[in-house]
Image: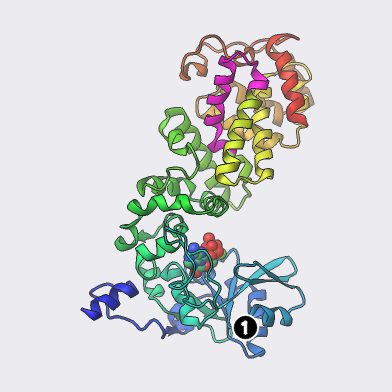
Amino acid sequence: MIKKFIRKILGVKEDEPARDPTEPDVLGPQEHGIDPRLLSQNAVRLTQTLQDAGFKAFVVGGAVRDLLLGVKPKDFDIATDATPEQVKRLFRRAFIIGRRFQIVHVMFGQELLEVTTFRGAGATNAPKDEHGRVLRDNSFGPQHEDAMRRDFTINAMYYDPATQSVLDYHGGIADIRDKILRIIGVPEERYREDPVRMLRVVRFAAKLQFQIEPDTRAPIATMAELIHNVPAARVFDEMLKLLMSGHALACLKELRNSGLHHGLLPLLDVVLEQPIGMKFVTLALASTDARINAGKTVSPGFLFASLLWHETLQKWDQYKAGGESSIPALHLAADDVLEDQTEKLALQRRIGSDMRDIWAMQPRFERRTGKAPYKLLEHPRFRAGYDFMLLRCASGELEAGVGEWWTAFYEGEANDRERLITTPITAPAAPAKAKRPPRRAPRNRADIPEVDQGPSGASAEFRSGAKLSDE
Ligand code: ATP
Ligand code: MG
């Protein structure tokens, strides 16, 4: 009975021998097979300096997991028994950051290494909110407690570059080999202490293509609600990591399967259920994943502009139906969506302003005569607006000919551009717009491809939009 209880506390399966969580398995280079060339030389120097001063120092967490998977880690975290003050004294460019839990940022040229002092297992006495979420937990402690406080077995290993040994406290090596994502300890307790761990389950399972161990998965469906207690800024950070993981599409599917998608991105669930919205979001995420996997950069502004576009479109229509003219209506819609999201999602101001730029540029792509296309090309965020417009074409929301015209214009030489501007644009037989729900009247004249949009109507509205979006 007591043994069974201890197994449960330690998250050990029935058929496995219980392990002593204070004693790690120590694996040498032959056993773990880490290629030392994947290591950052600065991480090696940093651990060496700490060790020379008499401290313990290891590469820890995601970097060890990636090294074991043969992947070059994108950053290196270091764990040590030196206090933040002791670390700071050893390096010229070291900065203590954080108030609740101090960590040290050590800079080597452009590379930033994060050094954390081993955390103690103080969670039981730590102050919590009424749902059991740990509010503060600042105690330092021995290495095995630090390992116990980490989230997954595969994220709780330590690598010592000097001896090239891996310290494995929770069977992480076996789980890496079997491609299993397993939370450390009792899953319900770990999610209650920090509900963000549920999002991390989804992210790592999708990113690493690991199976979620059944006990790790089981409580998520019923505990998903607890995410709503977490400060919005933290959820946003984790969502951003999820969306930028290179596996965003798989992550969102998994979020839905786990019942975690509600309220994360307000209305994402609604968006995902609309046929055109779904296609748009799917295309946007697939292109984000492709860029990340090709080593290209992705702007969070573009990503969130995509995720919330259909929300904006709906509001845009509502304002227009209420008698507002097109461009001011778009700006009002953007204001509403951004205001709502800034509050719920803790969207940073800079991201919000990128989103607004991308949205505000959209009607301008429908004006393809005179000087307007040249002016639009000069917009500092033209490329993002253009990519966004292409997604709208690919999803069937916008007539494909608009995208083709702009690609020819953007990639063309001066004479090609001039020819495009002066060649009349013929209306297609069956506009893609028909796929959108029927409206009272044409939404605005810019929706209907036409030869010359003249100085009145949509183009007059357009100019006010151009002004707003050029600000
Ligand atoms: P990535 O490669 O995506 O950065 P990572 O594992 O390094 O993955 P981080 O968010 O950088 O993830 O966290 C670093 C380490 O800190 C993790 O590997 C884990 O050991 C620990 N950790 C992070 N967040 C939590 C959490 N919410 N609960 C427990 N441990 C955590
Ligand atoms: Mg990391």
At 65% across and 40% down in the image, what residue appears?
Answer: 352
Between residues 196 and 374, which one lies in front from this camera angle?
Answer: 196
Above or below residue 416? Residue 451 is above
Can you give x and y, in whole percent of width and height, for residue 134 in the image? 48, 64
Three-letter code for the amino acid on which mark 1 is drawn: Ala
Q: Quadrant of residue 458?
A: top right
Crowding at mark 1 (Cα within 10 Å: few <14, some 14-19, many 20+): many
**Quadrant of the rendering where the N terminus is positioned:** bottom left
Q: 143 left or right of 369?
A: left
Check disc 1 and report the residue beneath it. 82
Above or below residue 226? Residue 276 is above
Can you give x and y, in whole percent of width and height, for residue 61 in the image? 51, 70
- The magenta region covers 305-329
Between residues 357 and 85, which one lies in front from this camera angle?
Answer: 85
Q: Residue furthest left?
A: 1
At 45% across and 67% down in the image, what residue appears?
Answer: 151
At 46% across and 58% down in the image, what residue appears?
Answer: 200
Q: 234 left or right of 40?
A: left
